[in-house]
Amino acid sequence: SQTIHQWPATLVQPVGSPLSLECTVEGTSNPNLYWYRQAAGRGLQLLFYSVGIGQISSEVPQNLSASRPQDRQFILSSKKLLLSDSGFYLCAYSSDSNNQPQHFGDGTRLSIL
Amino acid sequence: DQQVKQNSPSLSVQEGRISILNCDYTNSMFDYFLWYKKYPAEGPTFLISISSIKDKNEDGRFTVFLNKSAKHLSLHIVPSQPGDSAVYFCAASAIGSQGNLIFGKGTKLSVKP
């Protein structure tokens, strides 16, 4: 069966520190991978998506970056965190076929102090 | 400009009755629509989807209706149960968008015993 793992579950970081959030998927090959952020009281905003190793597309200009070093690994990073980077970060995957649902990890609650 | 709108931030329903969650969209290129359920501090869970070639899809207690002329979809839950209490997100993807989802801001459903 297919599963998605995301860690850590919660993270408290000082302003200006680096960030690395990791997401891995099991049980599927060549998935589409996604990073979303949910700010307080708002819907989910797509940050990055990837259709293959090393292929990253960004949806919004921001302080974050993403990388896909392996087929089923997706990493969200920042060199220097801002207060505005606080939020709930979600990783998701879908098969590479058309009209397939995305399945989400349990998310990382990131608080910037 | 919100392409997917959920105009009711909250809905309260009695156990056993029908819950109707509504969603409107503006992009005529959307061809795939989904509903997700989300509990606090967890990732969204996929519930049900519908392709634009259909106007109804049913899965157990959940039915999604699509009215393309009105650019409107709805999720019906019958009968509603207290465990259905959660935030429900409507999402849509457009032809050729690599499956990228645009989410509404969510509707918080409370089912009272």
Image (cartoon, coloured by chain):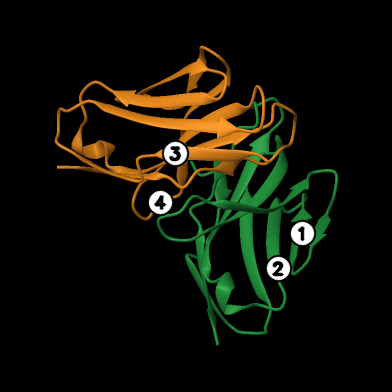
Q: Nearer the viewer, residue B51 or A96?
A: A96
- The residues bearing labels 1 and 4 have C-alpha atoms spaced at a distance of 24 Å
Q: Residues within 10 Å of mark 2 (few under 14, many from 20)?
A: some
- The residue positioned 67% from the left and 33% from the top of the image is B94
Q: Residues within 10 Å of mark 1 (few under 14, many from 20)?
A: some
Q: CA distance from mark 1 to mark 3?
A: 33 Å
Position of residue A29 measured from the top left corner of the image (x, y, whole percent)? 67, 24
Check the residue under mark 1 and report the chain it is in.
Answer: B
| SS label for mark 3 | strand
Q: Quickly name the residue at label 1.
A: B65
Across and down, in percent, residue B67 comes to 77, 55
Query: Marks 1 and 2, Cα distance to the nearest angstrom?
Result: 8 Å
Q: List x then y, in percent, for residue A30.
A: 65, 22
Q: Amino acid at mark 1?
A: Phe
Q: Colour of chain A?
A: orange
User: What separation in Å lies between label 3 and label 2 (alpha carbons)?
Assistant: 31 Å
